Image: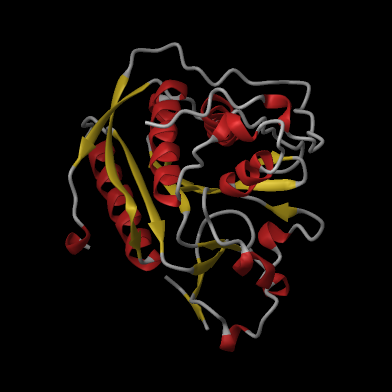
């Protein structure tokens, strides 16, 4: 039924993967914003599994608050939420059920049709989901720029922290290593306030992706950071470079810290952590 609601990997050689890389489009945007650094509150739930419906409702409440601030001509700071979800499928506003490889009445997990862009995707444990709820008036009022800048954050995370060379594919949204999509992006913008966001597969069980056509792309694969690192480790030439291999919890923590760092730098924001506990949901 569709529901309407301190390990460092810098020493890993970049030449250790034999996956053919896709070239970026010729025209590259510089996402660094040469303006005064602004504050951004961050709700850190990256170790928690948050039901999708609750996180979705929370985003919409924050958007509503920001709209009210703008109407009253008050300061509207940016907000960042980072978490994991319980297993769930989400669809965009125009998504087709043809991309579901199951009877929607007997879906393996809840299915939500949302107001974001894009086709169906899967969220679950081991996947870091970042929801930037930001006022593009403070950055650049350009949706294409915003999407490319989110991609830039992810590309930097993979490169700087894991020495994984990721790239864009012209005409598609997201971040890729060869034919594998490691991160999906789907956004909604209302009155230049963004919500929804990006999902990075870190230690995700990729099996549930096989029950859908992820993002409506039939001839593309889905990958994860853990999967790629395991491929690197299987090469005896580079095995010593990444030992001891981190466990899932360490990989999630490393990825989270890198996401926050790169998001802060690319969007020129000063991150202020705000406390919130799971029971508050």
Residue visible at 62% across and 49% down in the picture: 227
Quadrant occupied by the C terminus: bottom left
Quadrant hosting residue 251: top left
> Can residue 275 be seen at all in this image of the molecule?
yes
* Viewer-proximal residue among 144 and 85: 85
* Res. 34 image quadrant: top left
Q: Which is more toward the observer, 79 or 177?
A: 177
Question: Residue 217: x and y, percent?
Answer: 75, 57
The one of 145 and 197 positioned closer to us in this rendering: 197
The spot of residue 37 in percent (x, y) is 33, 17
Residue 200 in the image, given as x and y percentages of width and height: 53, 47
Instruction: In the rendered view, tell whether residue 54 sits above or below residue 73.
Output: below
Quadrant of res 99: bottom right
- Residue 71, placed above or below residue 45: above
Residue 75, percent from left and from top: 23, 30
- Say whether residue 195 is visible: no
What residue is shown at x 30% (from left), y 44% (from top)? 67
Left or right of 204: which side holds 236?
A: right
């Amino acid at each position: 039924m569709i529901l309407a609601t301190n390990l460092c990997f810098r020493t890993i050689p970049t030449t250790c993967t034999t996956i053919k890389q896709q070239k970026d489009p010729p025209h590259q945007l510089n996402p660094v914003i040469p303006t005064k650094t602004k504050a951004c509150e961050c709700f850190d739930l990256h170790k928690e599994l948050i039901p999708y419906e609750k996180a979705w409702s929370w985003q919409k409440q924050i958007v509503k608050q920001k709209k009210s601030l703008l109407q009253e001509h008050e300061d509207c700071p940016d907000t960042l939420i980072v978490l994991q979800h319980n297993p769930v499928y989400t669809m965009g506003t125009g998504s087709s059920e043809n991309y579901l490889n199951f009877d929607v009445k007997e879906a393996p997990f809840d299915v939500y049709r949302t107001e974001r862009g894009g086709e169906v995707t899967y969220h679950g444990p081991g996947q870091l989901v970042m929801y930037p709820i930001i006022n593009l008036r403070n950055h650049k009022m350009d949706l294409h720029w915003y999407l490319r800048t989110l991609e830039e954050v992810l590309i930097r995370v993979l490169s700087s922290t894991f020495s994984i060379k990721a790239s864009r594919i012209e005409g598609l949204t997201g971040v890729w290593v060869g034919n594998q999509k490691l991160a999906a992006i789907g956004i909604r913008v209302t009155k230049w306030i963004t919500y929804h966001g990006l999902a990075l597969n870190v230690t995700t069980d990729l099996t549930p992706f096989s029950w859908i056509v992820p993002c409506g792309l039939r001839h593309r694969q889905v990958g994860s950071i853990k999967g790629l690192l395991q491929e690197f480790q299987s090469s005896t030439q580079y095995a010593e470079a990444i030992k001891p291999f981190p466990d899932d919890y360490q990989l999630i923590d490393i990825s989270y810290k890198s996401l926050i760092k790169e998001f802060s730098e690319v969007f020129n924001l000063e991150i202020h952590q705000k406390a919130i506990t799971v029971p508050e949901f």
